[in-house]
Image (cartoon, rainbow, N blue to C red):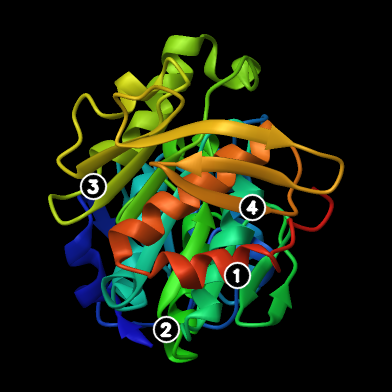
Amino acid sequence: MKLLSELISSISILTIHGKLDREVTTIEHDSRNCVENSLFVAILGTTGSDGHSFIGNAIENGASTIIFQTFPDTFYPHCTYILVDDTRDAAARLSNAFYDFPSDSLRIIGVTGTNGKTTITYLLKQLLESTGEKVGLIGTTGNMIGNELIPTNYTTPEAPELFRLLSKMKDASITTVVMEVSSHALILKRVLGVRFSVAFFTNLTHDHLDFHGSMDEYSKAKQILFNSLDSNSIAILNGDNEFAVKMKEDTASKVFVCGRNSIFDYFIDKEQLTIDRSEFNLNGEIYSTPLLGRLNIDKVAFRLALCDQLGIDSSIIKSILTLVKGAPGR
């Protein structure tokens, strides 16, 4: 539990109605999950839903603090109401503070792009676990704390769920978290405040334009991840995709480009594809994997680039590559 008066120092407030010397037991964006003394954040949805319509339900279930950006029809005198400009921004900042900034104690590896996110996160999890690390995973096919699978409805959870999950991972002695970071999550501020140590860019294709409107806006959404990196972070980009240039425009991180041009930091060539294996050279060293096809060569090469930057011996990587499996259903 946290005191409301302490938590709200992390957000920008327009108006407060009600007392601040109250405890907060949980932070929720879904009214059904509220319990006694929950803080409910009324988030505007993207498909016509509006969390403000469920404020009454949240209070019935025990919520005593309401964060809102559109005035509700009814004010309950026993509750505290806090008006903000952007409830999504507030949800992320409050959740991060409530769970004591969990990403500061974890190595977070974010993977973004239209395709390949799920496979890369699973490959990274297998590799890092083989070196003795305890790894968490967040993504489309489910979230994992070690070997424990937690079902999910989102590629990247909403902020209250995400920071709760990161906190659980921290408490379970997880050292590294590999997570898919969708463009929706970036635009909707679900990962606002997460400290990423590494970010991957896989590609950008003509998907999700119903949400983003244009490729330019889609690429700007992806840039949010790279623009959030600091100078101690690493960005690994797919140089074969034209939008890689956009990802490094304003990032402060160290940038490494991987692809099929000899000018890149990690150069893929001499690819051989058979019915049961894929072989390729990366910077002159031969690698072999049971994952088939050119796209899987990309995914393995990106992972190899990170391993090189982390100082993992290539002989260890080669032995692990013979055993790796793709993500479920991929």
Q: CA distance from mark 3 to mark 2?
A: 21 Å
Q: Secondary structure at mark 2?
A: helix
- Taking the image as shown, residue 286 lies to the left or right of residue 142, namely left
Q: CA distance from mark 1 to mark 4?
A: 10 Å
Tag in front: 3 or 4: 4
Q: Secondary structure at mark 1?
A: helix
Q: Residue beneath label 3, please?
A: 229
Q: Nearer the viewer, residue 289 or 57?
A: 289
Instruction: Quadrant for residue 224, please give it.
Output: top left
- Taking the image as shown, residue 200 lies to the left or right of residue 35, namely left
Q: Residues within 10 Å of mark 2 (few under 14, many from 20)?
A: many
Q: Earlier in the sequence, mark 3 or mark 1?
A: 3
Q: Which mark is residue 288?
A: 4
Q: Earlier in the sequence, mark 2 or mark 4?
A: 2
Instruction: Quadrant for residue 167, please give it.
Output: bottom left
The residue depicted at 33 percent of the width and 69 percent of the height is 103
Amino acid type at image mark 2: Lys
Q: Residues within 10 Å of mark 1 (few under 14, many from 20)?
A: some
Give coordinates of residue 242: x percent, y percent.
43, 15
